[in-house]
Amino acid sequence: MEREIKSIMAAITALPQGRGLLLFLDYDGTLVEIAPRPELARPTPKLLQVLTRLTSLLSQAVMVVSGRPLADLKELLPISGLNYLGSHGAQGLLGGRLWNLKVPGGSKEEQDELARQMTRDLTGLDGWWLERKSPGFALHYRQAQPLEERRIMAVLEPWLRQVVQGGRYQVLRGKKVVEILPQGVSKGAAIQKILVFPRFSGLFPVYLGDDVTDETAFQALQGHGLTVKVGDTAAASAAAFSLANPKKVRQFLALLADHLEDGL
């Protein structure tokens, strides 16, 4: 067992006897490696198997938290009893019931107009594409060459500042992606709401994520949860532990399932 995984397992096994776990798992860059396009980042049968085991062992207290739309998560991970939080916590499927994070935000028509503005400004540049979500939208530029990426950002930055100054929307920056979402939407805000649900209250939260958008969750769980940053550990993070990559995450999850089956 590698040192990082051993440290995380030690913290979990040190919990009071009978304290259940509530497992939060980011998808891209955490459960699976980041791909050039989101549709290429598919779970392996082995990953589906270990998530199925954990969902059963933890009495359905397993939740995938992602910037992806809710429908994408359900299609990628069709596991009975699994919970989902999509669009950075704006939408959820919890215990089989739809749930929405209530925040003041613009209408779909307003978001459509913002998306049209962005598309118009970037016309003629290559390597980017727009993903519509509910709420908001995301600009992906992972396929842009370095020079074209600089051109995209040179056009985009003044426009993004104007959007933020309007006070109704926020800009979330991830790995080769910029997302426009209503103010108040974040993974951390959603998790704070979920932790007081009767079916989840009293459980010990464990959160694994790789991106800057996971930092709000790390911050929300400081002092009363276990947080794990996946990937680059050079950047500052509010997470208490780290794992090098999704492969290590999958190793940890398999080990956790083994321990739970042994009566952890």
Image (cartoon, helix red, strand yellow):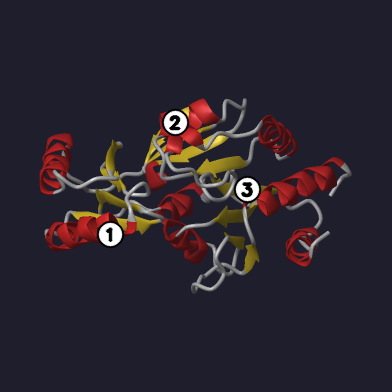
Measured as percent of width and height from the top left, residue 147 is found at 27, 59
User: Taking the image as drawn, is residue 241 in sight?
Assistant: yes
Residue at image mark 2: 72
User: Taking the image as drawn, is residue 199 in sight?
Assistant: no
- Which of pointers 3 and 1 indicates the residue nearer the eye? 1
Measured as percent of width and height from the top left, residue 134 is found at 30, 36
User: Secondary structure under badge 1?
Assistant: helix
Q: Which quadrant would residue 138 be assigned to in this image?
A: top left
Measured as percent of width and height from the top left, residue 94 is found at 51, 34
Residue 30 placement, left or right of 211: right
Q: Which mark is residue 76?
A: none
Q: Nearer the viewer, residue 78 or 224?
A: 78
Residue 182 placement, left or right of 94: left
Q: Amino acid at mark 3?
A: Leu
Dot 2 or dot 1: first in sequence order is 2
Q: Residues within 10 Å of mark 1 (few under 14, many from 20)?
A: few
Label tally: 3
Residue at image mark 3: 23
Q: CA distance from mark 3 to mark 2?
A: 20 Å
Q: Amino acid at mark 1?
A: Leu
